[in-house]
Amino acid sequence: MIDDLDEYGCALAGRVLTREQCREIAALYDEADRFRTTVDMARFRFGSGEYRYFTHDLPDLVRDLRSAFYPRLLPIARDWAAKLGRPAPWPDTLDEWLELCHEAGQDKSAQILLRYGPGGWNALHRDVFGEMLFPLQVVVGLDEPGVDFTGGEFLMVEQRPRAQSRGHSTTLPQGHALVFTTRDRPVATKRGWSNAPMRHGVSTVRSGRRHTLGLVFHDAS
């Protein structure tokens, strides 16, 4: 996984949810009281589809997944910061880090449940919600590609200096997690390490319905 993260800015991390667990989380989308807000992507020209931000009262599966990923991703985050000569303000535990986010005014839940129907897509973007930023995040596929929907590949685009941008697409299997950079990643150059700006999105869903769970390791302002 680390090699792909370093090379492409994203990497599949294997199955983290069963099919039944995926269906359980996807079904939560219709329980409006679990979410603090709903975003219509077309209204804000973000794409086409919807996503909802959970409240801080996260479902057990979502909370446990987020807590399990943080210590695995922390060494990578610290390594990238060292290569780019940036601060690495992240404590050893997620709770400590979130407390720092809240003290800085970032106290809104940023955990996302997304739903796309036919024609749905997500524009290339970054999920940066304030100064307190964790450089990696996770998306989990909740539906089965080729069965529940077609299209809808995860997209990652690297902006390269003095060159055309480079793109990567990944089909996200049901129940599998994909780790990707929130903002950029270190790239080795003749003069040392440089940052490569990265953006992510979703290609057009051609048929069916696609749900994904987004795990973000900093809260929003």
Image (tube, rainbow, N blue to C red):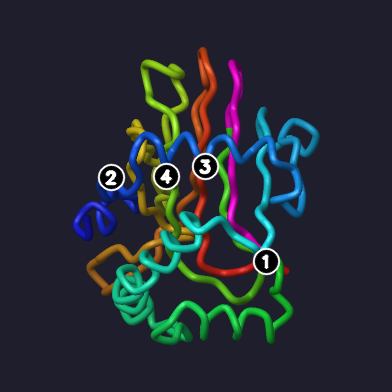
Residue 93 horizontal/vertical position (percent) = 43, 82
Q: Are marks 2 and 1 in contact (CB under 8 Å)?
A: no
Question: Is residue 168 at all visible to an observer of this figure?
Answer: no
Q: Which mark is residue 15?
A: 2
Using the numbered discs, state the Cα–Cα distance from disc 2 to disc 3 in whole angstroms. Answer: 15 Å
Q: Are marks 3 and 4 in contact (CB under 8 Å)?
A: no
The residue indicated by pointer 3 is 25
Residue 122 horizontal/vertical position (percent) = 58, 34
Residue span colored magenta: 109-121
**Label 3 Cα crowd, 10 Å radius (few <14 / some 14-19 / many 20+):** some
Using the numbered discs, state the Cα–Cα distance from disc 2 to disc 1 in whole angstroms. Answer: 27 Å
Residue type pointed to by label 4: Val
| 137 falls in the magenta region | no
Residue at the location (52% across, 20% down)? 205
Q: Can you tell which of label 2 and label 3 is closer to the viewer?
A: 3
Q: Can you tell which of label 1 and label 3 is closer to the viewer?
A: 3
Residue at the location (43% across, 68% down)? 67
Residue situated furthest top in the rendering: 207
The residue indicated by pointer 4 is 140
- Sequence order check: which comes first, mark 4 or mark 1? 4
Q: Can you tell which of label 4 and label 1 is closer to the viewer?
A: 4
Helix, strand or loop at mark 1: loop
The residue indicated by pointer 1 is 220
Residue type pointed to by label 3: Ile
Residue type pointed to by label 2: Arg
Reply above or below: 147 against 34: above
Helix, strand or loop at mark 2: strand
Taking depth in this image into account, of 37 and 88 the one nearest to the observer is 37
